[in-house]
Image (cartoon, grey):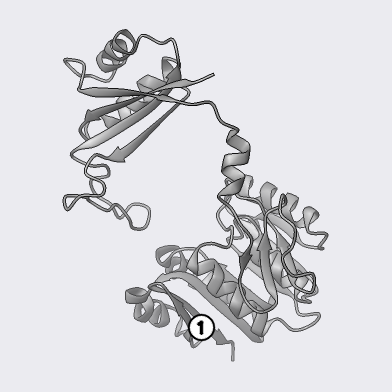
Amino acid sequence: MPWLSISIETDCRHAEALADALMDAGALSATIEDADAGTPAETPQFGEPGSIATPGWERSRVVALLEQDTDADEFLAVCASQAGLDAIPPFTRSEVAEQNWVQLTQSQFEPIRVSHRLWIVPSWHEAPDPEAIVLVLDPGMAFGTGSHPTTRLCLEWLEQETTPGASLLDYGCGSGILAIAGAKLGAGEVLGVDIDMQAVEAATRNAERNNVQARFADSTKEIPKQYDIVVANILSNPLKALAPAICSHVLPGGRLALSGILAEQTDDLIEAYAPYIALDVAGTREGWVCLAGRKA
């Protein structure tokens, strides 16, 4: 059965309210885009949480998917009123053909070769190299599918630095990919922690799928010991705030790696960690940096 897609022009002051009203009225989905995307007027929106003062685009586009027989004019009139608009904004409509959405989504995710030995492979694919160390990981809600440069940087570092039997802490574990990689590379005791309990649950499932011994827990709870290897792939502001806590979990002589850091943030992070561990640039990729060091 085909679907009806409507594309509505509005502004940043009404876009979110309109998308919410569309969903409340029964839309199957509603997304907000830059109406000037792909033109010289396109306005990128990126940065750490809280760093964008005026989120959204002055010329916004809300795209909603509706049942095929929906009266778009009547539907949008109700939603526009609920969103505080005085009139129905300009919109276009188009038909979306029925597809195998699961197959379509899966086709967008192929195995990723991280290094000579490490591959990240979705569960519906065969491992391309039978001799490789394979991390079975499906795209999901938790951050860390291996496609982001910061994750790749941490995985490359772990491949070089993980020694057999070493204990490992993945601070801000997301999907658990770094903890799982460490376990597959020979680490002994492995713990991943995250403030998001959905991430903890997803990481636990991913570890079971990969047949590795790794434990995952709430990062707000006490972490009672120190580790040979600590890796934290989050963002620069949390990394700076957490510097004393993260470094306290590194054993003397242990190794620390940090990522989620833009190149221009490198000096600030090195300075923040200097009282605890001297860090150097261990790798760069697409404007992102991995910092690493050894605790005295």
Q: Position of residue 10 (x, y in %)?
A: 21, 29
Q: Secondary structure at mark 1?
A: loop
For this rendering, which residue is in front, 38 or 222? 38
Residue 236 rendering spot, x and y as whole percentages: 41, 67
For badge 1, the amino acid type reads: Tyr
Determine whether, in the image, residue 192 is placed left or right of residue 270.
right
Q: Can residue 223 be seen here?
A: no
Residue positioned 65% across, 84% down in the render: 160
Residue at (72, 53) in percent of width and height: 206
Count of numbered marks: 1
Left or right: residue 208 compared with residue 21: right
Which residue sits at x=83%, y=59%? 211
**Picture quadrant of residue 222:** bottom right
Position of the N terminus, as image quadrant, is: top right
Relative to 282, does residue 108 appear above or below in the rendering? Answer: above
Residue at the farthest bottom position: 296
Pick the quarter of the image with the C terminus. bottom right
- Residue on which the image places disc 1: 276
Position of residue 204 relative to residue 86, above or below, is below
Q: Position of residue 31 (x, y in %)?
A: 38, 34
